Image (tube, helix red, strand yellow):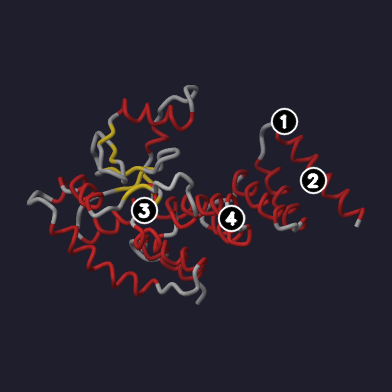
Amino acid sequence: MSPRQACMQCLQRDPPALFEAALWIAAEHDDQLQPVQILNDLHSLLLQVSAGLPALPARELAQPLLRRLAELDFQEDDEGVTRPHHALLHQVLRRRRGQPLTLALIALEVARRLDIPLQGVNFPGHFMLRVPGADHLLDPCSGRRLYTRDCRDQLYRQLGPGVELSAVHLQTADATDMLRRLSRNLRMLHMQHDAPEAALKDAERALLLGPPNLVDHLARADVYRQLDCPQGERYDLERALLFCEEEGLRLKLGERLRSLQRASALH
């Protein structure tokens, strides 16, 4: 079974094996990685975390859990330039530095094993966590509580002043949502660091993990362009046109397709 197949199989379980699925995503980029070994090794981290938690009901332990992980040096990446290893789960476990989403995946798995209720929240630009029913979010990098005003400030920093905070920004993320976001993060990072072959794996997975859409087809078209694969680029541009409702973008996509056809004719 390939890492891709193993990842998809994890999502078929009830409940989905989110953490293991994320490890199989990492295994697509590191053929030495053995997810089963990582899962077994997680027991020592579990002991370290649980030893530092206060004697409180499980519902009140989400924030102490996140603070405990921060004490154990699980922090947001601080290198100045975010790299693919900040989004690859096994690397984050080893380095204890990562993106908010990857840190959240670790926190969610530890919480699950300790029966602490915790959910992912697909907040734009900075993945968040939440105790079900709570009136605030939790930053996976520090455990800091974020109330409505804090969320507005965070949204302003990510998207600018023209975007109002709404319910869509605070939606709970299921396992598929998180793996799709992880795939998009990895695709972007691999493209930024001149690894289009790796980015193609992530772009393909993002499309497999949900209904096809404009953004993911355009993203894969850009990867194919980097790989000098006009046939793949053409396919994704044609698919993107089916989802595009903005006239200006439709014109740009049409011109891009025509330029591909002209280039093919010249060859």
Q: Which mark is residue 203?
A: 4
Residue 134's place in the image compared with 229, above or below, is above
Residue at disc 2, secondary structure: helix
The answer to whether 159 is drawn above or below residue 120 in the figure is above
Q: Position of residue 59 (x, y in %)?
A: 16, 47
Q: Look at the numbered discs 1 and 4 and tell me whether their residues touch, using CB distance below 8 Å.
A: no
Q: Residue at x 56, y 55 (%)?
A: 190
- Residue 97 shows which numbered tag? 3
Crowding at dot 4, Cα within 10 Å, few <14 / some 14-19 / many 20+, comes out as many
C-alpha gap between disc 2 and disc 3: 41 Å
**Residue corresponding to mark 1:** 248
Inspect the image, locate mark 3, and give the three-letter code of the amino acid beneath it.
Arg
Mark seen at residue 194: none
Residue lying at 18% horizontally and 47% vertically, measured from the top left: 64
In the foreground, 250 or 31 = 31
Which residue is identified by label 2?
A: 257
* C-alpha span from label 2 to label 1: 15 Å
Q: Could you tell me the amino acid type at mark 1?
A: Gly
Q: Left of 164 or right of it: where is 196?
A: right
